[in-house]
Image (cartoon, rainbow, N blue to C red):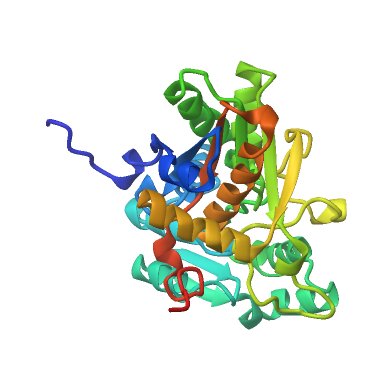
Amino acid sequence: MGNIHQSITELVGRTPLLNLGGFQKHHGLEANIIGKLEYFNPNQSVKDRIALAMIEDAEKSGKLKPGDTVVETTSGNTGIGLAAIAAAKGYPFRVYIQDQVSKERFQVIQAFGGKTIKLTEEPTIAKTLEETKGDFIAAIKALKENVLDKEEGVTFVDQCSNPANPDVHKRTTGPEIWEDTDGKVDILVACVGTGGTISGTGAYLKEKNPNIKVVAVQPGPNSLPSAEKPVPDEEITGVHPFEGVPENLIPATFDRKIYDEWIAVEALDAYEAAREAARNDGILIGASSGAALYAAKLLAQRPENKGKNIVAIFPDTGLRYLSTNLFTTEE
């Protein structure tokens, strides 16, 4: 009947590209910065893609059965995507979530009927994080082995090791960028959380044109916890370091051979880029999107990139950050 969709699962993907002409003019840039606006997904983030892919993959394999509870650990957006898809498909959902994420994330997950548990409230996770000095990968493993594997009717989707994560980007995000630019993309810029977005998208684009440059973004040193400052003044939620990090702390979903260059971005620079996108192009993007935009600006300022098309993936909406300092400016 006409063009009426029957489920939000039919609305995931096919997000638009936008040339940030105002931002480019503001900075006098001579390269095109093109944002992939992932907040056009039904729950306003790129994580809707992997939420749908991981749940449907688990259904097809028989791992996820009717009545089972979907479980994940996350810094926020994956939890929101999974909560929404689980609700649409009739599954209960439970998430172990980082304490410091914006309160909007907790509220949205709970609105979808999901149960939220802070990492510090789960004894196994809290103990492992303390013993390993913050090894999140080890904490996830401990949670799985000591809690989830002993619980009936639970499906832990585990975005950090689930191959459906990078695969969905190779099947959808990469082809969308290639088609919407008519193959005229020179540089791809993406932040690294689980690494699935850049790994899958980059793999597809490099198969189409090996000369496409893939640039990965990680937080700068001042935006990471340290011995001197365990809690930084500002962080880029969902973006994690990968250069100079022990191999065992890198998610299995991140193909470290896919990127040609990496750029470290400080949170305050990411915040300012997000604010400039709002003021100059009328789009409200999140902190990780601001980090990708700032990195794209640095690339656009290089003389060798004059006239090139730089596609930056903007993972989510700025509406998830209104309770943070992202859009707080002094009068």
Q: Does residue 37 appear in the picture of this structure? A: yes
Residue 243: where, in percent of width, then height? 82, 50
Front residue (pair 29, 282)? 29
Which residue is pictured at 39% across the width and 57% down the height?
279
318 sits to left or right of 245: left
Which residue is pictured at 55% across the width and 33% down the height?
30
Q: Does residue 62 appear in the picture of this structure? A: no
How many marks the image carries: the answer is 0
248 sits to left or right of 97: right
Which residue is situated farthest in the front direction here?
A: 28
Residue 258: where, in percent of width, then height? 73, 33
Which residue is pictured at 42% across the width and 45% down the height?
22
205 sits to left or right of 60: right
Which residue is pictured at 53% across the width and 52% down the height?
289
For the C terminus, which image quadrant?
Answer: bottom left
Which residue is situated farthest in the left direction here?
A: 1
Residue 123: where, in percent of width, then height? 69, 81
Q: Toward which corner of the image does residue 262 lie, by quadrant?
A: top right
Picture layout, residue 85 above or below residue 33 = below
Front residue (pair 13, 316)? 316
For the N terminus, which image quadrant?
Answer: top left
Picture layout, residue 113 above or below residue 123 = above
Residue 176: where, in percent of width, then height? 46, 28
Front residue (pair 58, 233)? 233
Picture layout, residue 312 above or below residue 244 = above
